[in-house]
Image (tube, rainbow, N blue to C red):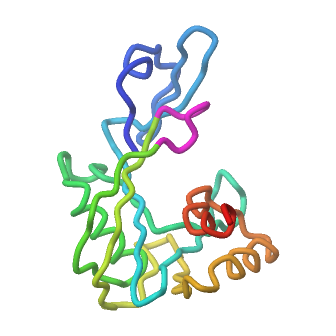
Amino acid sequence: MSDAPGPAATADIMWQGTFITVRRQGNWEFVGRARGISAAVILAVDDGHVLLVEQYRVPLGRACLELPAGLVGDETAGEPIAQAAARELEEETGYRAGAVEIIGEFCSSPGMVSESFTLVRATGLVKTSSGGGVAGENIIVHRVPLATIADFIAARRAAGLAMDVKLLLLLAPGLLG
């Protein structure tokens, strides 16, 4: 997720931490990524299945079901998006991608956040480990048949999980029909 050019670049910084910046322009307050960090969100599809991750999210105070994702450039400046996405996919899910294709840049919550994310598609998946993320992340990996994705998401919602808005990508065919 990166800060888009424009108002975010000229807004006053109210506070800045290691990973986020709070800015104000006129009466508008918003949040963005600090230090040029961006993110990749990974649509990992393999043999009629999609990989999802479940992890506790402090701002929500509960676990959230999401597409795998990770920061780009937080440890190595200039890291290519596809390389970071492949690294994050393997860390979080235990699957290595044979190919990573950049789909495009999307804004996550444009009324409040100046950041965007790059959606990538990972294919040719090979399981290399159990995943789970780096120390302390405690990520649960789900490999879900695309044919039952709506039921799976509904069941996890009923169990009390938060749902990342990017899951709408998987629900769109059923919502549009």
Determine the residue positioned at 52% across, 75% down: 52
Q: Does residue 96 sit above or below 85 in this rendering?
A: below
Determine the residue positioned at 42% across, 80% down: 93
Task: Specify the farthest residue to the top.
Answer: 26
Residue 113 is drawn in which quadrant? top right
- Name the spot of residue 83 as percent of width and height, x first: 21, 63
- Name the spot of residue 166 as percent of width and height, x first: 56, 58
Q: Does residue 40 sit above or below 132 in this rendering?
A: above
Residue 167 is drawn in which quadrant? bottom right
Task: Specify the farthest residue to the front.
Answer: 177
Q: Is residue 125 magenta?
A: no
- Name the spot of residue 34 as percent of width and height, x first: 39, 35
Between 89 and 19, the one nearer to me in the picture: 89
- Name the spot of residue 39 as percent of width and height, x first: 38, 51
Q: Specify start and end residues of the magenta stretch as a single range.
A: 107-114
Q: Is residue 111 magenta?
A: yes
Determine the residue positioned at 59% across, 70% down: 55
Left or right? Give the position of 102 relative to 67.
left
Between 160 and 169, the one nearer to me in the picture: 169
Between 15 and 108, the one nearer to me in the picture: 108
